[in-house]
Amino acid sequence: MTEVAPALELTGIDMHYGFVRALDSIDFTVGQGEVVGLLGDNGAGKSTLLKVMSGAHRPTGGQIRVHGEEKHFQSPSAATHAGIQMVYQDLALVDAQDIATNLNIGREILRKGPLGWLGFVDHKAQRKRSEVELEKLGVRTAAMTRPVEMLSGGQRQVVALARSATRITGERNGILLLDEPTAALGYEQTQQVQALIRRMADQGIAIVLVTHNFPLATAVCDRISVLNRGKKVADVPTAATNYDEIVGWVTGARASMFA
Amino acid sequence: MSMTVPHETNEAVAPAQAGATAPVPPARPEGDPTGIRALIFIRDRGIFVLWGLLILGFALWANPFFASVTNAVLVANAASLTAIFAAGVAVGIICGALDLSIPGVAALAACTCGWLLENGQPVWVGLVAGMAVGVVVGLANGVISLRGFNPIIVTIGTLSITTAAASILVGGYTVPGLTQLKFMGTQRYLGVPAPVYIAAAVFIVGTVFLTRTRDGLRLMAVGGNAEAVRRSGIHSDRYKVLGFVISASCAALGGLVTTAVVTEASPAASPGIIFTALTAVALAGVSLAGGRGSLPRVLVGALILATIDNGLTIKGIDPYWGTGLTGFLLLASLGLEKWISTTVSNRLVATAQASVHTGTR
């Protein structure tokens, strides 16, 4: 079996704001079908690293490889083009539109024939495609024609995740960056989102999960990376660590694995 | 109404097991409870019911003059101008911007057309030039607003500019005797005046565009959440400009039809246009926050205004009673919509919680 390049590989990423080193030669990889948790205290550099991955920030130094190819993202749309989708905390759904429209916007199915040339959308085909896609993810929310404003917080999160997931499952599975996907959710809804994240990974999507929620991270991640003041202090399989160790790395009480 | 994602409580220790979760049963999403559907029906279709009640009431009260085909044509004709302007206001609001330049654009389009006709140009040149005025002002509104200025202030600016331009063009006087435009003014086809056909065409095309076409759906989505559209890889700015262009084009069309009806082009912009149009739009429940609204409802909003006017006139009641009544209707519909929205969301939250906790559906 040949060596498969990681879906996303960052090597030696530096990020300086003036004299402040926000990121200090960070190495980070996530493979296909792997969920990697990115933990750290506020200001540890999690969000900055995530923004580097999503193309929102250009790193001062270091390399980014997507499926083994080196990339220089000039903008978030360049990262999107390379198969990287970021799911933001604010979800960015169109409230007044239904689930199908939200899932299909930007990649609408047009009707066949002259009506299609006029830009007519095939609502039926869109609903069908969305149903298939959601079923593939093992998600059943509400009727496809339900406006997003009438969904619960967990359902909205599921729709937002599914929207991103359906945009990166091309010939090669993409990379999904999640920023605090369960921040606004209750216990039950967190469980649902957690299950969805696992299923997306099982389909080969590479997932980076930024969170403050340690139980979520230990439950859903294959591997956990911890940042502390811009440096990576730990990178371990979830099975090989425990809650206390993670808290130790996050707070800085425990010495770095790489010191 | 349920989330049937299975609860994998056992995976908290070993994430690797999560892949082996039970497959989700391929069930169809079930419908909503009847109560909620009824409330949503009232919210979405209530204005049609209201109009029906008004017609019924006036038909009984003003019998036999109100409920006749002749009078229906009168009502439709009276509503058509308001409806055309209301369509412009509505598309602007749906796309996220209240376009206040509408009266000015109408006046400038009318005067451009009138001036060209007075100078011996053929009718089609006048009409095309009038519509072009709408497109150009709409583009200007859109492009300036995109620079980060408040659309309301920008369109107040273009309102002044277009009004002034109209006066300058025709030297401050009304252009009279434009009988060439009679074919789209007072002329009747099959007993129905031309403006009714024009308004009908605007609403049919507009409704199909907004609900059936890719660009229309994106336009509505931009009004609802421009950021969501942008993140989907779409140039949301283009659709914002498109909203302004459609809005100003409706204004220009309204100005031309007004000119055709009164056979003269007046450079005086009447701000009353926009408030009547806004009343119809607000009655139709188009949210000023943008992203939602339906043109058929806006049409009925304009028809309600015309119906009230017409019915009260037949009964010989002073028109200001009608204005007052409209105000009350507007406030009442606002209250009703608020109540329905909160009730629906409360109920939905209740059922969502229940289904999650029982874990059965």
Image (tube, rainbow, N blue to C red):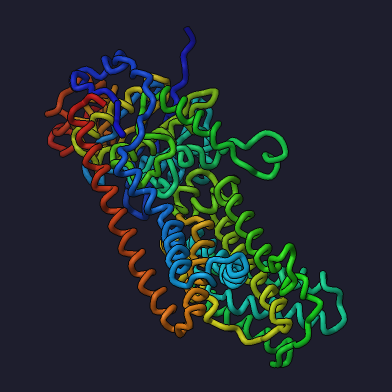
Q: Find residue B268 and report its image quarter.
A: bottom right
User: Whole-percent x and y of residue A3?
Assistant: 46, 13
Tell me if A37 is positioned left or right of A79 in this view: left
Residue in front for this viewpoint, B226 or B172: B172
Can residue B236 be seen in the rendering of this structure?
yes
- Please identify the quadrant where the N terminus of chain B is shown: top left
Above or below, comparing residue B32 to residue B164 in the picture: above
Q: Quadrant of residue B241?
A: bottom right
Q: Residue at x 63, y 80 (%)?
A: B162
Q: Residue furthest front?
A: B64
Q: Position of residue B310 (x, y in %)?
A: 52, 75
Q: Quadrant of the C terminus of chain B?
A: top left
In front of the other: B43 or A85: B43
Instruction: Choose between B7 and A174: the one closer to the eye.
Output: B7
Q: Quadrant of residue B24?
A: top left
Q: Residue furthest top?
A: A1
In the drawing, does residue A75 fall left or right of residue B134? left
Point 59% across, 70% down: residue:
B71
Q: Position of residue B288 (x, y in %)?
A: 42, 64
- In percent of the image, x 49 and y 27: which residue is there? A169
Q: Is residue B253 left or right of residue A87?
A: right
